[in-house]
Amino acid sequence: MTPNFVEYNNTDILMDSLALTVTEELKKFLDEKELVTLSLPGGSTPKPLFDRLSMKKLDWQRIVVIPNDERFVPETSMLSNCGLIRKMLLKNFANGAHLLSFFKPNLSAEDLSKVIGDEIKNFLPIDICIIGMGVDMHIASIFPDADKLNEALDLTTLQTILPIKAPSINETRLTLTAKVLRESTKLHLLLTGKEKRRALEFALKSKVSWAIAPVRSILYDRNEVNIHYAN
């Protein structure tokens, strides 16, 4: 199925619209089940979205927030996605949400992935997933040059999260697998900038392998993917 591509006049309108859409989806899931899962990306792009979501009046205590991925650093680090989410989202009305942290100081990345992986299984499938994409077409921390790329893209894997390294990144990371991401009930791809749009258009039109364009792994054979773009 062709993804639903929506282009906005500017990023403010995009963030306003996506925050409203996700809020309505959260309300619907909250009416249907006791706990609702929301998976979020890191980086600077979604900061305005997190801020807007924090102002939405929802039963946040029943919402579990799961990062798409995380650097293997403490939440106090400026590089931490969990730290960013906690700072930008878990405030105002959303201060009661539960954030599933991807860092424990006494565990190695390998051991941590096993502990968190088992915990994540209790919340699958993810109800709503917002994900970004890099100009190299990576998603979460599934980079084209990653050491465990094939495992991360394997749709038959039983693993939910992997420790992962790549020459293009400076630190070990933990990433949700493509299988977990693509099986989210609602999936939103958030993009800004012409370079990323060109990369996405290439990924959509070409038939290159997922290893070259990991974003294709979440677009393949999905009932619905909503792509939100502003220059």
Image (cartoon, helix red, strand yellow):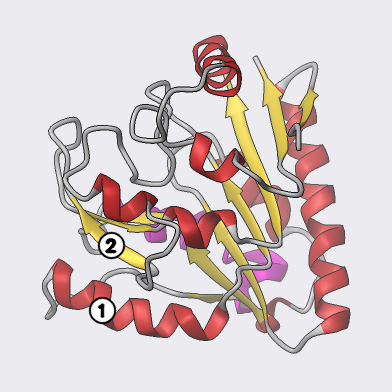
User: Does the stretch in magenta take in 81?
Assistant: yes
Q: Is residue 226 above or below residue 119?
A: above
Question: Magenta segment, principal secondary structure?
Answer: helix
Q: Which residues are magenta?
A: 79-96
Rendered location of residue 74, percent (x, y)? 23, 64
- 62 horizontally vs 111: left or right: right
Which percent across, then down, holds residue 4? 79, 33
Q: Which mark is residue 74?
A: none
- Residue placed under numbered mark 2 in the picture: 162
Viewer-nearest residue: 20 or 152: 152
| Front-lying residue, 62 or 207 | 207
Q: Residues within 10 Å of mark 2 (few under 14, many from 20)?
A: many
Amino acid at pointer 1:
Lys
Q: Residues within 10 Å of mark 1 (few under 14, many from 20)?
A: some
Task: Identify the residue at horizontal 43%, vertical 23% (top origin).
Answer: 208
Which residue is identified by label 1?
A: 114
At x 77%, y 54%, the residue is: 22
Q: x, y (%) of residue 23?
A: 81, 59
- Give the residue at x 53% y 56%: 181
Q: Secondary structure at mark 1?
A: helix
Asked if residue 100 can be seen in this view, the reply is yes
Q: Earlier in the sequence, mark 2 or mark 1?
A: 1
Specify the quadrant that holds the N terminus: top right
Would you say 151 lies left or right of 24 here? Answer: left
Task: Check disc 2 and report its element: helix, strand or loop.
Answer: strand
Residue type pointed to by label 2: Leu
